[in-house]
Image: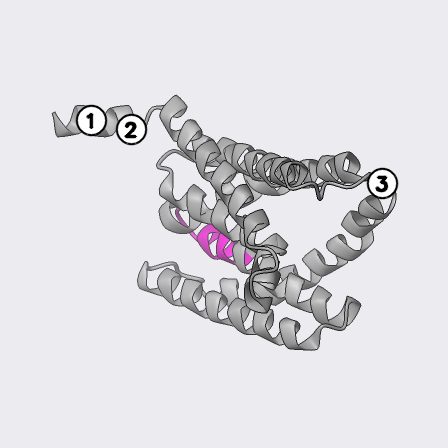
Amino acid sequence: MATATASRRDTPITVLAATVGFGLLLGWATYGLHGTTPLLERATNSVSTWIIWTAAAGALIRVRPLAVWGGALMMLATCGSYYASSALGDTFGAAGLGTAAVWSVAGLAGGPLLGWAGWTVRRGRGDVRAVAGAVITMVVLGEASWLGLTLHYWGQAVVFLTVGALLTALLTAYLARAGVHRYWLCTVLAPVGGLAFHLAEEGILNGLLGSV
């Protein structure tokens, strides 16, 4: 009986529906928490928030292809829910559709990658687990770099840098305990990936957002 129940919970439709549901909730929550406190304002108005939760969802899914598909669907659901909430809150704006389209495309690119990364850190084999860990943490470190070097929000940049460094340390320690041979690759590759993420966000994403 327990095996049959677990099997039903792991069916693709159930897993993907749960992922989409969580994405809808996340999008609504991030919009609703805007402006409540300075800390929540920054935390919810952040690429890292959506991406870290997508990686967490990937880690909870048992099957790798479902984790990848779940990452894509979760990011689309989160984006759709956020902008739907914005429209209902009368804050959508004239460029809302274009902005939503850009973030949806970004979600389709990043969602599968982060879903895979979350799955791989928990369930993968070999040194690729350390690479996947760096993929997750690079987002926070890259956003810290963007906040400081591009926007000059140095106080917020320090917070994100601290969170990114702590997350990198925790994932590296987890991988070491899990027996990953080159667990230290997570720590080495995370800042390199963070720089690449910063350059992509500044050069590609901001360019697309500026054109809508």
| Residue 192 visible here | no
Relative image position of residue 209 (x, y in whole percent): 80, 46
The residue lying furthest to the left in this view is 1
Label 1 CA crowd tier, 10 Å (few <14, some 14–19, many 20+):
few
Quadrant of residue 63 in the image? top left
Q: Residue at x 50, y 44 (%)?
A: 26
Looking at the picture, the colour scheme in use is one colour
Element class at badge 3 = loop
Any magenta on residue 128? yes
Using the image, determine if residue 36 lies above or below residue 86: below
Residue 103 placement (x, y as % from top left): 69, 41
Q: Are marks 1 and 2 in contact (CB under 8 Å)?
A: yes
Q: Secondary structure at mark 2?
A: helix
State which quarter of the image contains the N terminus.
top left
Q: Which residue is mark 1?
A: 5
Q: Amino acid at mark 1?
A: Thr
Q: Nearer the viewer, residue 41 or 101?
A: 41
The residue labelled by disc 3 is 212
Of the residues under marks 2 and 3, which one precedes in the sequence?
2
Figure quadrant of residue 90 = top right
Q: Residue at x 67, y 37 (%)?
A: 87
The residue carrying mark 2 is 9
Q: Would you say 151 lies left or right of 78 here?
A: right
Mark-to-mark CA distance, 2 and 3: 41 Å
**Residue 13 shows in the view:** yes
Q: Secondary structure at mark 1?
A: helix
Q: Image height check: is 38 above or below 136?
A: below
